[in-house]
Image (cartoon, rainbow, N blue to C red):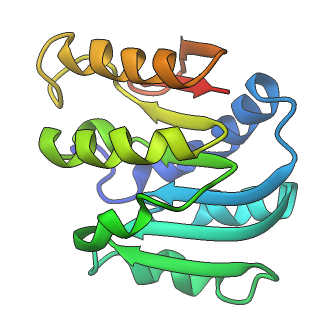
Amino acid sequence: LWQDGGYGHYSRQDGMYLDLLKKLLPNFKGGKVLEIGPDTGVFAERLIDSYDITDYTVLDLENNIFDSVKKLQNKKITLDYIFSQNYKDLFEKKFDILISNVVIPETPKKYREDLLNHVIPNCNSAFIIGQLTGPWVNGDEYKNWILDLFNSNYNNVHYELTSYKRCHVLIGS
């Protein structure tokens, strides 16, 4: 993924991702958002401008997080940021939606499983973009794990292939 275009190249897909969110989660109106790996904050900004977002929490690497925080700091929301090494601080928090674009499959297995196994049950819905199989994951292992996680926490689970780099959108509500 990172070979053509470098850091942030996938953020050019934000319009498509927002359209998918509107299409596949039509009942989502806003509220409290957790975004894992917000990159430059472009998608977060579009989401805030399109929905009634009250609280926005970003989780990212310490050396990356301030790109998105800088973009969002003047929005009329409650903004919180958590460095990735402090991800367990999220375990007791509740969110209306979890958002992640491309990041989850690329994170180390132990970290992503601990994070999502504890956070997904506290999110009313989830919207994750990423490859379900491929070089970032071990065969179908990731796909099977994340689909099981979604199916055990949400009544409605849907995934479909996007037009970007064999990435799927995975939705639970």
- Quarter of the image with the N terminus is top left
Q: Quadrant of residue 56?
A: bottom right
Q: Residue at x 50, y 39 (%)?
A: 121
Given residues 155 and 85, the one toward you in this image is: 155
Query: Percent position (x, y) of residue 14?
Result: 62, 47
**Residue at x-position 53% and y-position 62%:** 93
Residue 129 is left or right of residue 124, and the answer is left
Horizontal and vertical percent for residue 90?
A: 43, 63
In this rendering, the answer to whether 86 lies above or below 78 is above
Side of 116 where 13 appears, left or right: right
Whether residue 40 appears in this view of the structure is: no
Left or right: 84 with respect to 152? left
- Tell me the residue at 71%/81% (across/down): 78
Whole-percent x, y for residue 124 in the image: 67, 40
Q: Residue furthest front?
A: 92
- Give the x, y percent position of residue 130: 40, 31
